[in-house]
Image (cartoon, rainbow, N blue to C red):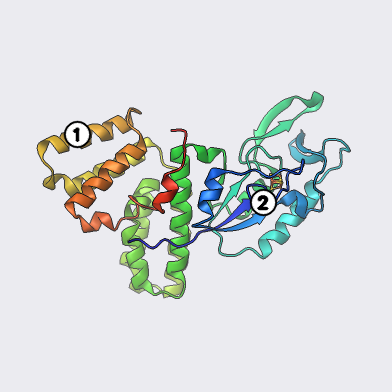
Amino acid sequence: MVRYPRPRVVVSECLGFRPTRYDGNIIYDETVETMKKFTDFIPVCPEVRIGLGIPRNPLVLTRNMNEIYLLDTKTGENFSHRMKEFAHSFISYLNDIDGFLMKSKSPSCGVGDAKIYGKDRAVIGRSDGVFTKLMREFFPLLPIESEKRLLKYEMRRNFFTKIFSIADLRETLLGAGSKELVAFHRRNKYILMLHSPHLLKKLGRLIAERDLRETWELKREYSRTFLEALSRNPGRGSYANVFVHLYSHIKEDLVEKERKYILALIEGYRTQKVLLKTLIAYFRGFIYRLGNEYLAEQRFIDPYPEELDQMHVNE
Ligand code: SF4
């Protein structure tokens, strides 16, 4: 049975931790509630942490020239500078984190969907909330998602895969030697192929030439390149490519009908007729039935606890 590490994830505090919303509310989100069993959350409400009360006046983003400001809707007070100061102090005590899960649409926490208002209160664009934007600048290679974006299965799968893989890497690097890193690389081969075949090759070379480097140097270079690989989001073509590789490992053990069926499923996925979840379930079944140990140890098929795959999703 796979033992999954617990990812450390910064989360918007109003998502089920404390009623910190401007109107004094709290939001219960199924994804966050289910994740609590498997995740070490670090809740933060940036607006409360810069000294605003609960309840408080709503804030908005406005653009003036090329600058985006965080303003109080009623008084017009500008909180951009205070938010920047808080973000700097917040990251100074953050360490060993694996990702961010933020509240959608918020001018502080939103992920790409916070409204920006221009003159006459017209919406002139959307962006990250001010706090999220700063976190992205400080941690450009870490996954950042909102609870709303995670309603889509592929987004959710990518996010969970990333935070659990990064947590696994973090634990592997703790005091381990190059032997553990070799095993880590082996079990993450198809996750890496999914996100970046090019960086999979680069990491493979690093592992093959591991004796030419000091262990600390190997770990540092491996870690940086692994995060860079996972920072890319795979499309359907990338998934289909990995499934074709998995298929090549089991095809000799399948009967003709099964071969045709599985190739049709991969093609169906590529052309948006088959769901990713369905394809994964079929492959999992074949791998278990055939007892293929190499594929069974690959994290690509089961990158995170199964319970996290059983929530409601928009396909
Ligand atoms: S969205 Fe962010 S700033 Fe707003 S209440 Fe939630 S945690 Fe606080």
| Neighbours of disc 1 within 10 Å: few (<14), some (14-19), many (20+) | few
Q: Can the viewer see residue 82 in this picture?
A: yes
Q: Which of the pair 74/281 is nearer the observer? A: 281
Q: Does the residue labelled 2 lie within 8 Å of ligand 1?
A: yes
Tally the marks: 2
> Which residue is under mark 2?
13
Residue 140 sits above or below residue 119 on the image: below
| Residue under the point 44% across and 48% down | 308
Q: Nearer the viewer, residue 153 or 139?
A: 153
Residue type pointed to by label 2: Glu
Which mark is first along the chain, 1 or 2?
Answer: 2
Looking at the image, the residue that sits furthest to the right is 75
The disc at residue 261 is 1
Q: In which quarter of the image is residue 291?
A: bottom left
Residue positioned 72% across, 61% down in the render:
89
Residue in the picture at 38% in, 53% down: 303
Q: Which amino acid does label 1 sit on?
A: Tyr
Rendering quarter of residue 255: top left
92 vs 252: above or below:
below
Return the x and y of residue 275 as percentages of the image width and height.
Answer: 35, 34
Mark 2–mark 1 Cα distance, whole angstroms, equals 46 Å
Q: Residues within 10 Å of mark 2 (few under 14, many from 20)?
A: many
Kindly state the secondary structure of the residue where label 1 is placed.
helix
Lateral position of residue 56 relative to residue 212, left or right: right
Q: In this view, does 175 lie above or below 163?
A: below
Q: Nearer the viewer, mark 2 or mark 1?
A: 2
In the rendering, at what x and y percent does residue 111 appear?
61, 41
Residue drawn 42% across the image and 61% down it: 4
Residue 146 in the image: x percent, y percent? Answer: 58, 43
Against 140, residue 214 (above or below) is below
Residue 254: where, in percent of width, then height?
13, 43
